[in-house]
Amino acid sequence: MPHPYHLRNLAELADRALDVLESGVETDGFRILQGRVMAVQASPELGSSEDMAWGVSALPAGLSVPLHSHRAEEIATIVRGSGSITIDGIEVPVLEGDILVTPPNLPHLTTAGPDGPLVVQWVYAPPGSEVRWLEQA
């Protein structure tokens, strides 16, 4: 019987995401979508969670994700680099180690700073927003 937990190492995930970003070669669930690397680590769609989704993203310097909103609350932890997260028109500068909670249904976007890539660990609850990345993979 499989174990009931999913252990990952955040530093290793960040390294893998940055390797894929630099090489342009997708591997083992790390996909290049809209210029960034996305790696969903837990989702009901993957059978690895029931009520949340989490993963990592790596954005090259200067890239912004498209403005979007979703019903899920989102926790973003800045693993590497710096940039900003704009929530409902308010730009919040973020640095490595920062954690930011985005309320549900507010338009938001993440932008990597100009000096290097940005790696973000994200968690959504309820899940669902991650499905679009899994379908594109």
Image (cartoon, rainbow, N blue to C red):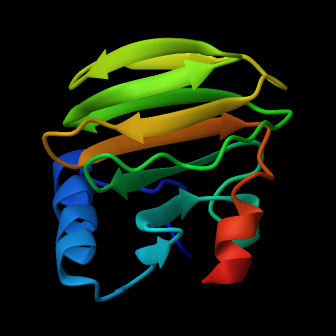
Residue 47 in view of the camera: no
Q: Give the residue displayed 69% in from the left and 43% down from the top.
A: 52
Figure quadrant of the C terminus: bottom right
Residue in the picture at 45% in, 13% down = 92
Side of 38 where 14 appears, left or right: left
Q: Quadrant of residue 79?
A: top left
Rendered location of residue 71, percent (x, y): 86, 33
Q: Position of residue 69 (x, y in %)?
A: 78, 36
Q: Please give left or right for residue 82 compared with residue 53 in the image.
A: left
- How far across and how far down the image is residue 4, in percent? 55, 57
Residue at x 67% of width, y 59% of height: 43
Compare residues 135 and 126 and report the one nearer the observer.
135
Placement of 67 over or under 43, stated as above or below: above
- Depth check: give the residue in front, 127 or 67: 67
Q: Residue at x 49, y 53 (%)?
A: 5
Q: Is residue 81 at all visible to an observer of this figure?
A: yes
